Image (tube, helix red, strand yellow):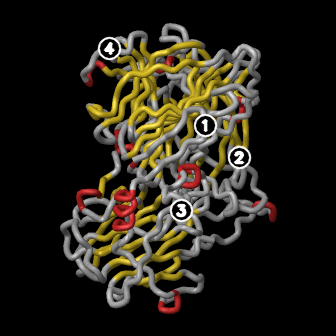
Amino acid sequence: AWKYVSPCTAAEIEIESDALESAADETFDDVVEIDHTDAEVVGTNASFIEIADDVDVAVEAEIEGEVTTDGTVDIDSLLQPRSAGLEQHNWDMGFEFAEEPCVSGPCNHQLSPTCLLKYQLNAPQTNVPSTITMELICEGVTWLGIGFSQDGLMAGSEAVIGVLGEEPKKYNLDGRWIGGVNPMDDSKQTLIDASINVYRGPITVLKFTKIMDEQGEIKIRPGDNTFLYAQGQSYFLGQHAHDSRGSFQLNLPSLEASVMDRSFSDVTETVVTTVAPTTTVPDQPCTTEWCEVELGTECELKYIVNYPVDEPSSITMDLTCEGNSWIGIGFSVDGKMDGSEAVIAGAGQEPRKYHLGGKWFGPGGVVEMPESQQTLLDSKMRVKWVEGSNGWIPLMKMRFTKLLSEPNEIEIRPGENHQFLYAQGSTPSFPSYHVARDSFTLTLPSDGSDSGSDTFVTVAPTAPEMQVTELSPECTLKHVVNVPAYTTRDKCEDCSITMELTCDSVAWVAIGFSVDGFMPQSEAVVGIPGRNPEKYFLKRRSLNKIFRLPDQAQTLTNASLTVDNGETVMRFTKLLNEPNDIPITQQLYFLFAQGYDENFGYHGPNSRGRFQLNLL
């Protein structure tokens, strides 16, 4: 249990001795370390593997954090970014303020034995309203919520709720049943830097910044304010835990004399994109770096042409428009809407492909293409808030990758003038009439195959070879790191790893990702015959403590599991960096396991191990 001593100061945690003993017991993991000299190295790049050996097992229980003289563990050393599993979490919130309580730094408010609230007020600047940053930290893997109330009761209140795999949103609490908990309209989803993540422990952290005074919503004012909090029984939104919810009051300081030293132009977002391994065309514009086009006064388009190895060519397009209305990019043969095609997305809507048969919605007009033609890769739609000359403004950001040539669709021809369209809607969600639209022309770079110029000659492509690592007498791993054309291996924006595990049996198989080389608190991709590989959270060694992640977190691409001639082969591609996942870095430990049979269960003592890979 955590014990927080004083609010608005550095907190302490005492971990009871029985909790320490439990933690020590859990580190006796299925995977144990042996001397590196016994590791078998395979391939030209130095990958190494440590195979578990039941004959000579020597495991030391590790308690992370600095132990004080009285045997307790200091929370600051336990939870700061230097702790192995929390590098992504910025506990000081990154603000610089004048010296005022809860303004110069975050204040703490203990809500329950398992939940802590950290909060900090952000003073206004010219045309920038006051905001409050709140961070709810709870033990376990659950949904979390912070509510804003006038009377301390749930009904009639408002809340920010975070569900794993989704962006936190603002909700109206119209009743105490699940049907009374409804997201606010898209136009009111004004949270800044909102996120929910799980870290080692496990703990779940909900963090967001909210405008204190918003039209039509319960206001947060200096002085006494009533708040609510709730922790779910699971990571799916549903009934909250009976012993982990309630109301509380905070006395917030005035911000009139404070000075905020943070620019909201620094607000960033994570957009995940997986692109196949590529080779680039030397000196070709728009193939190694983004090209940019201004569209009207409120939109900007970035694009890059991808020429993958042994795969169809594609274009990645990133459209950003001011406002909170739907946006779209069209593909046309004559610059007119009728007879064209488009990719369109709105607030809360993923990009989809449409036929533009006419200037109306419905048959013969604007209709969504059939599911068989929804072939966009890595499509995303996000709302982002930034500082403008007249205060905060929302930006709609849509990104997708589309094949240049697809059956029964308008072909995008490199080397020729190609007509495109763009549109910005009148409402957050599509469909509705547009308020801004136009056509424009792009001349996309070719792959150089038809050019006689030395400048545009394509280097003969060579696909990156998959490195091979022998994991056991029965299992072999192949892997390759995929670097998109628009980035470098050093920056590695949107880089991914493709892994192929082959085992000589018909059984479930798994590849894990661990910060310390042990199974508890790790993550894994598990492949079970008859099902596609999926992502799991490994809380502990028990089967009932291994959880499949929610559908929203199932972001693997090209995932498959096949059984042929007594061999099981699992293949998948996974991003190196995902918002809620353990980052895949050069220092990461990988785990592997092979089951007894097709039924997911215990892997046995000799069919698992840990290893590291050369990702450079």
Measured as percent of width and height from the top left, residue 571 is found at 39, 67
Measured as percent of width and height from the top left, residue 111 is found at 42, 32
Q: Nearer the viewer, residue 300 or 257?
A: 257
Provide the residue designation for mark 4.
155
Residue 584 numbered mark, or none: 3
Q: Do the residues labelled 2 and 4 touch (CB within 8 Å)?
A: no
For badge 3, the amino acid type reads: Ile
Seen at 54% across and 30% down, the residue is 134
Provide the residue designation for mark 1.
9
In the displayed structure, would residue 196 be above or below residue 181? below
Provide the residue designation for mark 2.
290
Q: Which one is closest to the eye, mark 1 or mark 4?
A: 1
For badge 4, the amino acid type reads: Ala
Q: In this view, does 585 lie to the left or right of 503?
A: right
Q: Are marks 2 and 3 in contact (CB under 8 Å)?
A: no
For badge 1, the amino acid type reads: Thr
Q: Which one is closest to the eye, mark 3 or mark 4?
A: 4
Compare marks 3 and 1 and give the one earlier in the sequence. 1
Mark 4 residue element? loop
In the displayed structure, would residue 430 be above or below residue 546? above
